[in-house]
Each structure stands twice: as structure tokens, then as C-alpha cells.
Image (cartoon, grey):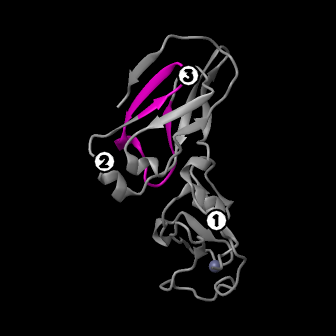
């Protein structure tokens, strides 16, 4: 299956469009992303494009049949991208926030979940466990259009473990690499942060 090759994705973190391959996009989005989501744009013709669905099959960026401008040179041709998606194969983004001269806090980025799947998860929780702490959030915090950054304390953890409903765990890894520098030791704590 031929994929468009000049596709950009909107980065809500950097507030700009960034080039992305179908393979990279597929790691972020396990299921189809419609052109209507306005997440991916063909840089040749500046129209939004679809990331096709597929589990074993190759996934690709496609122009949709209904779009206004059909003159894009990339409509007919393009390189091939083949890949098989596994949520367990990627690590979640981790960012440092609230930096002061002697302190900081960390946030773990959870990949977007389609709204129809979020709607099925009434009153469910997400548990994020670190080496020493546990953070519990409501699934209502998860965004359907961008990465959701959830606070995971100020003690760096070698690993971040996720536990929630099986439906969501098909989008996220069970464990994600953290950071290994030593800051201090705390007793195991639990935070309920719905
Ligand atoms: Zn185009």
C-alpha cells in the first residue's frame, strides 16, 4: 500500500507542524485517524489526510476521496511504509516541569485515546506506579486529540508502570522507561488525584 510521504503532524507541545512518517504515526495512533481530526496534513497540497487502519497490514497516509482539491501530486504515488504495531514497543514521553533551584516535578505523557473508547470507560481509573509511589487518575483526564501529561511526582523512577482497563492498555505500554538519576528515597506513597 502506497503512503503519502510529505505528511506533517500538529504538535500541541511545540505548537507547530512536524514531519512524520506513517510508521511513526502508527506507533502513536493504534487505530485509524480520520482526516476530519485535522491531525495530519499533506505538505504538498495543505489538506488534512487520513492515517489508515490496520493491524497486520501496512498502514499509510491517504488523501480522502471527498476532499476539495484532487490535484495533489502525491495522490497517485509515494513510497511504501510497512509495519506492525505493538503498544508495548514504545516508551511514553516524560517531561520535567516546575523547575526551581532545588526542586522539579515530572509528568508522564499518555497517548491520545479515541473518544468512543473513552466513552465506554465510566468511572475507571488509571494507576501509574513508580519505584516508590503510586498515582491514581480518572480516565476522564485523558484527551482524545493530544498527549495527556499527568503529574508523577518529583522522585525520578527507573520505570513507570501503567494499569487500567484492557481496552486502554492496547494503546499504551505496561511499562515505560523512566530516568535513573538519584534524588532521594521516600516511603511508598499513594496519591488520589482524580
Ligand atoms: Zn497532498
Q: Nearer the N terminus, badge 1 or badge 2?
A: 1
**Quarter the N terminus occupies:** bottom right
Q: What kind of element bears circle 2?
A: loop
Ligand 1: image quarter? bottom right
Task: Return the mark for residue 121.
Answer: 2
Q: Nearer the N terminus, badge 1 or badge 3?
A: 1
Task: Return the mark for residue 83.
Answer: 1
Instruction: Identify the magenta region.
Output: 127-151
The answer to which image quadrant residue 126 occupies is top left
**Quarter the C terminus occupies:** top left
Q: Nearer the viewer, residue 161 or 72?
A: 161
Q: Residue at 58% of width from left, 59% of height from top?
A: 85
Q: Nearer the N terminus, badge 2 or badge 3?
A: 2
Q: Position of residue 66 (x, y in %)?
A: 47, 85
Magenta segment includes 153: no
Q: Nearer the viewer, residue 34 or 83?
A: 83
Q: Nearer the viewer, residue 150 or 79?
A: 79
Left or right, residue 119 beside residue 56: left
Q: Position of residue 16 (x, y in %)?
A: 64, 55
Magenta segment includes 146: yes
Q: Label 3: which residue?
A: 131
Q: Residue at 64% of width from left, 85% of height from top?
A: 75
Q: Is mark 1 within 8 Å of ligand 1?
A: no
Amino acid at each position: 500500500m502506497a503512503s503519502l510521504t510529505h505528511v506533517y503532524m500538529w504538535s500541541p507541545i511545540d505548537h507547530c507542524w512536524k514531519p512524520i512518517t506513517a510508521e511513526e504515526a502508527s506507533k502513536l495512533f493504534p487505530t485509524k485517524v480520520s482526516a476530519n481530526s485535522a491531525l495530519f496534513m499533506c505538505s504538498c497540497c495543505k489538506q488534512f489526510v487520513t492515517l489508515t487502519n490496520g493491524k497486520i497490514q501496512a498502514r499509510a497516509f491517504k488523501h480522502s476521496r471527498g476532499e476539495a482539491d484532487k490535484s495533489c501530486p502525491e495522490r497517485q504515488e509515494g513510497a511504501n511504509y510497512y509495519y506492525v504495531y505493538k503498544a508495548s514497543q514504545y516508551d511514553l514521553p516524560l517531561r520535567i516541569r516546575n523547575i526551581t533551584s532545588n526542586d522539579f516535578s515530572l509528568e508522564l505523557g499518555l497517548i491520545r485515546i479515541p473518544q468512543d473508547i473513552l466513552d465506554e470507560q465510566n468511572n475507571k481509573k488509571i494507576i501509574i506506579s513508580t519505584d516508590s509511589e503510586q498515582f491514581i487518575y480518572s480516565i476522564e483526564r485523558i484527551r482524545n486529540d493530544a498527549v495527556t501529561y499527568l503529574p508523577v511526582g518529583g522522585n525520578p523512577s527507573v520505570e513507570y508502570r501503567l494499569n487500567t482497563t484492557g481496552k486502554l492498555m492496547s494503546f499504551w505500554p505496561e511499562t515505560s522507561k523512566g530516568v535513573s538519576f538519584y534524588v532521594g528515597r521516600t516511603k511508598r506513597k499513594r496519591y488520589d488525584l482524580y
